[in-house]
Image: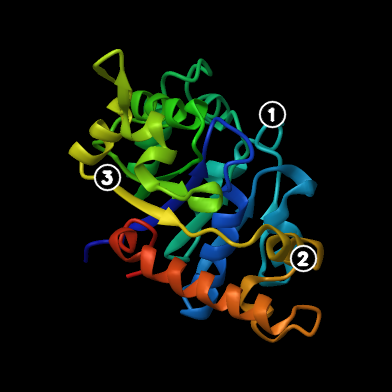
Amino acid sequence: MKQAVKRLVLIVSGKGGVGKTTFARLLVDTYHTRKIQASLFDADGQVGGLARTYQDLGVLFYDLRQERERDTLLNSVDTDKAVILHDLPGGSRFEISKIIDTGDGKSVEGFLTALTENHVRLTLVHLLDHEIESAQSVGQYLETFGTDLVDHVAVLNLRESRDLRNDFPYWYGHEVSGQRRYGKARERLLSAGGVEITMPGLHAATRAKVNALNLRYAQCLKHPDLTITERSAVSRFLRDFHKSLIPAATFLGLE
């Protein structure tokens, strides 16, 4: 009998503040709502936002940057759960390359081989904001991990966006002195079968309240500390998020 392939979902970016934990929280909400059995990890040590909000759902925390804890990432695939999710801190490309490989951030062949041998398919979820560093991070991960043994999902964070293409000039590319510049990471990701989705924005004040109250997004819909307008805004935010996931459903272990 052929062994089922598990899905390891790593939420990554070399740039901080791009929305990795927000996306992770929304995805955990989605797994929980759809009763998808998932192993959940916050790799940012004890300060991680995912662990603070979802510890009662079994989120485990560790620090990927600590040598004695780094192996937790690879060892986590030894589970009967179909999905293993890790919310990773910035700089994780180098930390992953230290688990089995040389640690230079450029080679993860041993790591990928170990996943294949244990019937695990890797998904890298790249969070992007409008800055050049987040687009460069995607290119660096593509160079290190390749596209043969890895599925890639680019998530454009619309938190500060009004015009999708114009607000992400280093992801889509733009003209400089009449010549097209940047956008190569996007072209490579899409040509290799990767998918591009968006994460909708939420009003800053509402987002601040949700974070201060340490709420799961699903809890916001009835929480008395939020106004009707704020609860309605979160409801729309969730609907838009779930709709945006459809192209990436397979890569995220949602079907």
Cα separation between marks 1 and 2:
35 Å
Scheme of colours in the image = rainbow
Percent coordinates x, y for residue 104 in the rendering? 51, 15
Front residue of this view, candidates 69 and 199: 199
In front here: 73 or 20?
A: 20
Type of the residue with mark 1: Glu
Which quarter of the rendered picture does the N terminus lie within? bottom left
Q: Mark on residue 155?
A: none
Residue 233 visible within the image:
yes
- Name the side, left or right, on which 173 lies relative to 20: left
Q: What residue does disc 2 label?
A: 209
Seen from this angle, which residue lies furthest front? 177
> Can you tell which of label 3 and label 2 is closer to the viewer?
2
Residue plotted at (32% across, 27% down): 174
Q: Residue furthest left?
A: 191
Secondary structure type for disc 3: loop
Q: Which of the 4 image quarters holds residue 16?
A: top right
> Decide: marks 1, 2 in contact (CB < 8 A)?
no
Question: Which amino acid lies under the numbered mark 3 shown in the image of this protein?
Answer: Gly
Q: Earlier in the sequence, mark 1 or mark 2?
A: 1
Residue 137, given in percent of the width and then of the height, sits at: 46, 28
Q: Residue at x 35, y 42 (%)?
A: 165
Q: Which mark is residue 194?
A: 3
Q: Is residue 96 left or right of residue 139?
A: right
Q: Write down the quadrant of residue 65 in the picture.
A: top right
Residue type at the position of mark 2: Lys
Depicted 124 relative to depicted 203: above or below: above
Position of residue 145 measured from the top left corner of the image (x, y, whole percent): 36, 30
Check residue 67 in the rendering and tell me which mark sits there, or answer none. 1
Do the residues bearing badges 3 and 1 touch, measured as CB atoms within 8 Å? no
